Image: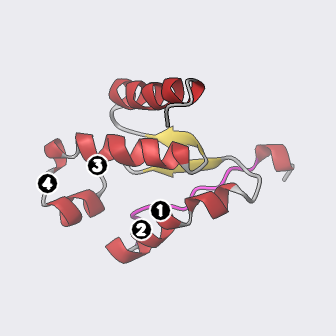
Amino acid sequence: VAHDRIVVDPGFGFGKTVSHNMQLLQGLSQLAAAGFPLVVGLSRKSMIGKLLGREMEQRLPAGLALAVMAVERGAAIIRTHDVAATADAVAMWSALQEFGEV
């Protein structure tokens, strides 16, 4: 497979405990440093429910926070259920980066 056709997806939630997912979050920068685009999907994950006690329909704010954190740590692609809200959150973070605010 050509290198330009490879992306890395750590597979948040797939057979992983909350602890496993938290370790992956902490290591995202290291995964991104491997040089392949990093794909991250965290929206509505059960780990949000377990950590915050939120039902599925109450997980948007935490999912947005995780998406921004993932981009900050090198994610190139965000998989989400809430496209417009996530795009706005990431665009706001990106705008702040341009002004050197963050």
Q: Earlier in the sequence, mark 4 or mark 3?
A: 3
Which of disc 1 and disc 3 is earlier in sequence? 1
Above/below status of 68 relative to 83:
below
Where is residue 3 drawn, in percent x and y?
A: 84, 50
Mark 1 or 2, which is nearer the eye?
Answer: 1
Q: Which mark is residue 21?
A: 2
Q: Are marks 4 and 3 in contact (CB under 8 Å)?
A: no
Mark 4–mark 3 distance (CA, rounded to whole Å): 9 Å
- Under tag 2, what secondary structure? helix
Q: Amino acid at mark 2?
A: Asn
Could you tell me which residue is drawn at 49 percent across and 37 percent down?
102
In contact (CB < 8 Å): disc 3 and disc 1: no
Using the image, tell me which numbered label, if any, was put on residue 44.
3
Tell me which amino acid carries mark 3. Answer: Arg
Q: Residue at horizontal 39%, vertical 51%?
A: 42
Tell me if 47 is positioned left or right of 96 in this view.
left
In the rendered image, residue 98, in percent from the top left (x then y), is placed at 59, 25
Mark 1 = which residue?
25
Range drawn in magenta: 6-15
Q: Is residue 67 above or below residue 1?
A: above
Marks 1 & 2, CB-CB < 8 Å contact: yes
Q: Earlier in the sequence, mark 1 or mark 4?
A: 1
* Residue 10 numbered mark, or none: none
- Residue 54 shows which numbered tag? 4
